[in-house]
Amino acid sequence: ASIPVLAIDGPTASGKGTVAARVAEVLGWNLLDSGSIYRMLALSAIKRNVAFDDEAQLVKLADALDASFDHGRIVLDGEDVSIVVRREETGNAASKLAALPAVRLALLARQRAYRQSPGLVADGRDMASVVFPDAFLKIFMTASAEARAERRYKQLIDKGLSANIDSLVLELRERDLRDSSRPVAPLKQGPDSVLLDTTAMGIEEAVQFVLDHAHAAL
Ligand code: C5P
């Protein structure tokens, strides 16, 4: 049998990253935080002065991307970028170049390479629809824009970064719109995905929900 993949897709700040990491830890599986790959490509483009709509140059950067996850640290070109990669402006830049079909295609094999024994938990926007369509469990995780903005606000403040709640709500809405209206791999719940709305739910409960469904399906 092929190596099992558990796909968790959803909008930014829905809590999917945290839940994916916890579920991977409990199962003893590998983890793919696909958003970080798009974020690292954005950082690479900024560093080299490549515009977010220069598809040809971005594909070259994607092919040559020297990015890795090292014990929870995010490393780009040998440099620890764990902090800057989480910034809102990095996420917004990532969402611009993620709208380009050739860029998505260039990052496909890199993402699929994370499928290693004994299993993979992958989070992103198109894990279920494009990257791992044969995932044994597909979760679509969401929460209201206000709840997500509040969580993102806390995360940023905890990391010592500055944040403004009203502009976070606006930015989230703008990013949701860009991610869900793009023609290629738009963010949306697929017909074979289980909906997990965490607006009024804590992380523990969300982790348990995913684990219960995983155990039932395995
Ligand atoms: O999930 P995260 O906020 O880190 O992702 C940053 C951006 O990367 C998203 O807004 C989205 O446009 C893009 N992305 C994507 N496909 C994925 C993961 C992220 O298009 N699988």
Image (spheres, grey):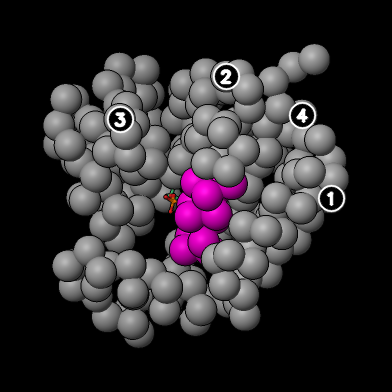
Q: Examine the structure image and report whether residue 18 is included in the region drawn in magenta.
A: yes
Marker count (numbered): 4
Residue count near mark 3 (Cα–Cα under 10 Å), binned few <14, some 14–19, many ≥20: few
Dot 1 falls on a residue whose secondary structure is loop
Q: Amino acid at mark 4?
A: Asp
Q: Cα distance, mark 3 to mark 2? A: 16 Å
Residue count near mark 1 (Cα–Cα under 10 Å), binned few <14, some 14–19, many ≥20: few
Q: Who comes first in sequence, dot 3 or dot 2? A: 3
Q: Who comes first in sequence, dot 3 or dot 4? A: 3
User: Would you identify the image quadrant in which residue 79 lies?
Assistant: top left
Answer left or right for 53 relative to 4: left
Dot 4 corresponds to which residue? 134
Residue occupying the point 58% across, 65% down: 204
Dot 1 corresponds to which residue? 191
Dot 4 falls on a residue whose secondary structure is loop
Q: Cα distance, mark 3 to mark 4? A: 27 Å
Q: Who comes first in sequence, dot 1 or dot 3? A: 3
Dot 3 corresponds to which residue? 70
Above or below for 76 versus 117: below
Dot 2 corresponds to which residue? 116
> Where residue 122 sits in the image (x, y, percent)?
57, 38
